[in-house]
Amino acid sequence: MVNNNIQHKSTSFKLSDQVKELLSNMGFSFAFNWADFKDYKKQCINTFNVAYAIAECFVVNADLPSDYEDYLF
């Protein structure tokens, strides 16, 4: 029995989209670029949550602060 419920949904399972979404939620959407993504993907391939590990690499190596740093919560 094959579950075809996902077939017509507009969800994305691409690793790059997952990383972009995580970075956007963290306020670092500006930090994403393809060259670094490919490099971090090779470095983090053996981690449990690859998308989160790649996003953390982008955050650690970001030169600018988060977009949310200026907001008071």
Image (tube, helix red, strand yellow):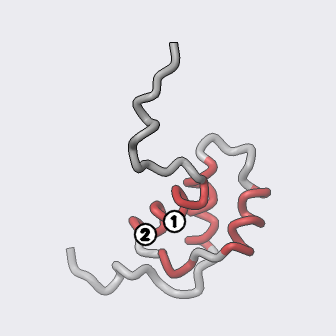
The crowding category of the residue bearing disc 1, from other C-alpha atoms within 10 Å (few below 14, some 14 to 19, many at least 20), is many
Q: Position of residue 18 (x, y in %)?
A: 52, 56
Label 1 belongs to which residue? 20
- In this view, the residue farthest toward the top is 1
What residue is drawn where x is 53% and y is 60%? 17
* Tag of residue 24: 2
Three-letter amino acid code at disc 1?
Answer: Lys
What residue is drawn where x is 59% and y is 80%? 62
The crowding category of the residue bearing disc 2, from other C-alpha atoms within 10 Å (few below 14, some 14 to 19, many at least 20), is some
> Which image quadrant is residue 31 in?
bottom right
Three-letter amino acid code at disc 2?
Answer: Ser
- Along the line of sight, which residue is nearer the eye, 34 or 63? 34
Element marked by disc 1: helix
Q: CA distance from mark 2 to mark 1?
A: 6 Å
> Which image quadrant is residue 35 in?
bottom right
User: Going by the image, does 25 lie left or right of 57?
Assistant: left
Q: Position of residue 38 (x, y in %)?
A: 74, 65
- In this view, the residue farthest toward the front is 8
Q: Position of residue 11 (x, y in %)?
A: 43, 48
Tell me, yes or no, whether the two marked residues, 2 and 1, touch with CB atoms within 8 Å: yes
Quadrant (top left/top right/bottom left/bottom right) for the C terminus: bottom left
Q: How many labels sit on residues? A: 2
Relative to 21, say whether 64 is above or below: below
Relative to 21, say whether 31 is above or below: below
What residue is drawn where x is 48% and y is 75%? 29
Q: Position of residue 65 (x, y in %)?
A: 47, 84
